[in-house]
């Protein structure tokens, strides 16, 4: 027997007759499932789709929650769902709204933000798990949502979370193990967030941080130094805004880790904004005064500024050489490549330390750190040891 090529119109007509007959609540639940299946099949004409939507609109106002819930569950993945109907269902009770809020792609960011303003925690939790959450929606969730909502948002790998949004999560839930754990599991973290996490996470989470990001276990005791070096390097690669640089500087300062080697690394990476903010934080001078000292004054003024930081005197020749290279680079008529700039700055530093091997940036910094370590070991009694 030959198969019928297209049964959808006949099926929809039959369903329409059932709807007009005024079915019981159980019948309406079944009818909502049946009409949704035909609608989702995508074989209806525009006129037939309009009829189906009229049935859906009636079901969306049904007094029986089961009918509305089935409708939402059946239509939540449909790209053909009218936006107005989606909003109606999304503003219903939680059991009806959550499937739409979790899955429906016809809701705009403006729709979601408006719903969040008066949403329950369960609704916000559903939104936090969407496949794709914009920064604006994420901020709205953090403004209104609970710790559970924040942790759910942080754990969503498809949520677009800029540094500012992650900082907001940590500001609002600074002591939350759930938020910390969710951030640790993200595929990539901005340096300022890593530094903040290191200040707070448990030993177990530090273990997980190492495992998640493939860090060698022998680096465990140097975790903070490793993070700080990577943070400064990442600033140059990702053009972090000033607000993030300020947060990173403040975090390093609070932990006593805003040190000479970090400044040298930043100078070698051409991160002048970080250097100006760091020196301002260490000396209590304004950013403008620091910039004037470094970019327009001579070595005596530069030494005066450096001495005010309390950083090791042993590092001043390297600092002075790096600042001179940066100033020449900024005022130079022809821009150097990063590789050329680093070769220049390393050559200048080595002139002040004849025993250094002029290799790469990390190796030169490691040699300077080794010199400082030797000086600490030879400090005796009342002689103040040098802190790097």
Image (cartoon, helix red, strand yellow):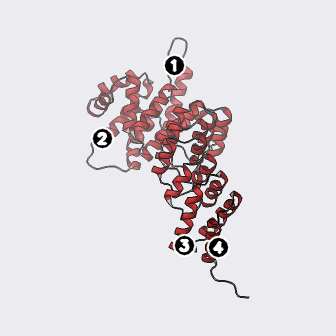
Query: Residue beneath label 3, please?
Result: 48
Circle 1 is placed at which residue position? 385
Q: Is residue 90 left or right of residue 291?
A: right
Mark 1 and mark 4 lie on one chain; the one further toward the N terminus is 4
Residue with the most extreme bottom position: 1
* Mark in the foreground, 1 or 4: 4
Give the class, few, some or many, for how many residues have Cα within 10 Å of label 2's Cα (few <14, many ≥20). Answer: few
Badge 4 or badge 3: first in the primary sequence:
4
Q: Residues within 10 Å of mark 4 (few under 14, many from 20)?
A: few
Q: CA distance from mark 2 to mark 1?
A: 33 Å
> Is residue 27 in view from this perspective?
yes
Residue occupying the point 31% across, 32% down? 291
Nearer-the-camera pick, 116 or 35: 35
**Which mark sits nearer the N-terminus, 2 or 1?**
2
Residue 361 showing in the rendered view: no
Q: Earlier in the sequence, mark 2 or mark 4?
A: 4
Note whether 37 is above or below 330 in the view shown.
below
At which x and y percent is residue 71? 62, 58
Image coordinates for residue 11, horizontal then vertical, percent:
64, 74
Q: Nearer the viewer, mark 1 or mark 3?
A: 3
Q: Which residue lies at the image location 59% right of the left edge and 34% below the top edge?
A: 222
Is label 4 in a helix, a strand or a loop? Answer: helix
- Quadrant housing residue 322: top left
- The circle drawn on residue 14 is 4
Residue 1: x and y, percent? 74, 88
Disc 2 from disc 4: Cα separation = 82 Å
Identify which residue is drawn at 66% across, 63% down: 33
Q: Viewed as shown, does residue 319 lie left or right of 369?
A: left
Left or right of 223 in this view: 330: left
């Amino acid at each position: 027997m030959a198969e019928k090529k297209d049964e959808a119109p006949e099926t929809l007509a039959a369903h329409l007759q059932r709807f007009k007959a005024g079915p019981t609540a159980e019948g309406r639940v079944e009818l909502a499932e049946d009409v949704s299946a035909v609608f989702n099949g995508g074989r209806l004409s525009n006129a037939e789709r309009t009829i189906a939507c009229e049935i859906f609109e009636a079901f969306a106002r049904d007094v029986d929650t089961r009918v509305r819930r089935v409708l939402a569950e059946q239509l939540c993945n449909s790209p053909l769902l009218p936006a107005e109907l989606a909003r109606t269902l999304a503003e219903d009770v939680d059991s009806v709204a959550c499937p739409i809020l979790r899955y429906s792609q016809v809701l705009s960011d403006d729709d979601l933000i408006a719903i969040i303003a008066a949403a329950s925690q369960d609704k916000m939790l559903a939104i936090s798990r969407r496949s794709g959450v914009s920064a604006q929606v994420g901020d709205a969730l953090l403004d209104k949502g609970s710790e559970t909502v924040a942790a759910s948002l942080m754990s969503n790998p498809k949520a677009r979370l800029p540094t500012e949004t992650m900082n907001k999560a940590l500001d609002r839930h600074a002591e939350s193990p759930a938020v910390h754990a969710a951030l640790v599991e993200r595929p990539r973290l901005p340096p300022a967030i890593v530094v903040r996490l290191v200040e707070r996470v448990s030993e177990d989470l530090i273990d997980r941080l190492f495992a998640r990001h493939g860090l060698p276990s022998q680096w465990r005791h140097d975790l903070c130094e490793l993070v700080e070096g990577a943070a400064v390097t990442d600033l140059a690669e990702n053009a972090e805004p000033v607000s993030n640089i300020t947060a990173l500087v403040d975090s390093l300062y609070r932990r006593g880790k805003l040190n000479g080697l970090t400044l040298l690394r930043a100078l070698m990476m051409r991160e002048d904004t970080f250097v100006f903010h760091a020196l301002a934080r260490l000396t209590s001078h304004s950013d403008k005064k620091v910039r004037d000292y470094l970019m327009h004054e001579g070595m005596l003024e530069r030494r005066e500024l450096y001495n005010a930081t309390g950083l090791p005197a042993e590092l001043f020749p390297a600092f002075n050489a790096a600042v001179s290279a940066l100033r020449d680079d900024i005022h130079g008529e022809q821009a150097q490549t990063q590789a050329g700039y680093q070769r220049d700055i390393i050559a200048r530093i080595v002139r002040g330390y004849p025993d250094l091997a002029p290799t790469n940036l990390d190796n030169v910094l490691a040699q300077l750190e080794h010199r400082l370590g030797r000086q600490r070991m030879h400090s005796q009694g009342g002689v103040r040891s040098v802190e790097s």
